[in-house]
Image: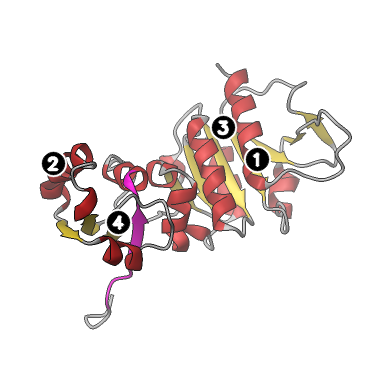
Amino acid sequence: MKTNELPKTVLLEGMTSISALLNSQKVNDRPVYRIWIDSGKAEKRAPFIRFLEAKKAEYGFDLQYTDAKTIESLATGLTHGGIVAECGERTIPPLTGAQIQPNKLYVYLEGMEDPYNFGGALRSLYAAGVCGVVLPERNWMNAAGTVARASAGASERLLLFTATPETAVSAFRSAGYQILCAGIRDSVSIYETHFSYPILLVIGGEKRGISRTFLENADKIVRIDYGSDFRGSLSSSASAAVLAFELFRQNH
């Protein structure tokens, strides 16, 4: 960073997103600069404020009390509950083979355009026990506050990496992982075929889909069978939830 360049800031809103960050030191290096609290809600938020006081020395942030109008001017959403945090950017490292844990489930999310959809996908993937999520270098973490709200803080708790499709294929193949791509053409049903970890599951966005590199290197294309004659496709976040939880079920 240049000496006259200010650091980029991210605003996290609400107890869920902020506590997720403050409890994720092992996977998340996002700095916290300042946390504002609506003084009118301080008594109601007393247990969470005690948590913030305990974390203040560890993170070095300022804890400031202000009025509801100021909080509203800072926040972009309506679910802040009178608490917002000014934070810095999180490091999302490039994927290397050494970072891949054995016998786990990882997911590569490709081509997701909407931060709410992206956040919803991360929420489901975290709940399903996914070890880490790999993203293209262009991703929606520049809208980290929106993603954190949509994911109920899961975006701050998950291990995140960046990689090109070529790098991801090479790294996970070297680690002994099978590669599954979500799709329809030449596919097998996720419900009728058993898949054992370790797995890299690739899920594409509604518009861009999955790149040819992944499709050409996939061990299987997997589909979600519908319970009715539905000609459309699920959203990426819904597909991520169904596929990840089915793989979790099969391996537990």
Distance from disc 1 to disc 2, alpha carbons, whole Å, reads 37 Å
Q: What's the CA distance linking mark 2 and mark 3?
A: 42 Å
Contact between marks 4 and 1 (CB within 8 A): the answer is no
In the rendered view, does 175 fall on the left or right side of 209? left
Taking 78 as reference, is 44 left or right? left
- Residue at 62%, 22% (x, y): give it: 196
Which color scheme does this rendered protein use? secondary structure
Extreme residue toward the front, this view: 40
Find numbered disc 1 in the image and state the secondary structure of the residue it sits on. helix
- Give the foreground label among 2 and 3: 2
Q: Is residue 225 left or right of residue 91?
A: right
Image location of residue 66, percent across then percent down: 19, 61
Q: In the rendered image, which residue does mark 3 sit on?
A: 176
**Magenta region: which residues?**
6-15
Give the residue type that dot 2 points to: Ala
> Which SS class for mark 2?
helix
249 lies above or below 7: above
Residue 198's place in the image compared with 2, above or below, is above
Work out which residue is located at the far top of the displayed protein and give it. 252
Point out which mark residue 54 bears.
2
Picture quadrant where residue 207 is located: bottom right
Say what amino acid the circle numbered 1 marks: Ala
Q: Secondary structure at mark 3?
A: loop
- The local crowd at label 2, few if under 14, some if 14 to 19, many if 20 or more residues have their Cα within 10 Å, is few
Which badge, 4 or 1, comes first in the chain's sequence?
Answer: 4
Tell me what residue is drawn at x 64 percent, y 25 percent: 246
N-terminal of the pair, mark 1 or mark 2, is: 2
Label 3 sits on what residue type? Gly
CB-based contact (under 8 Å), mark 4 and mark 3: no
Confirm whether the magenta stretch covers residue 12. Answer: yes
Q: Label 1 belongs to which residue?
A: 238
Q: Name the residue tied to disc 4.
A: 84
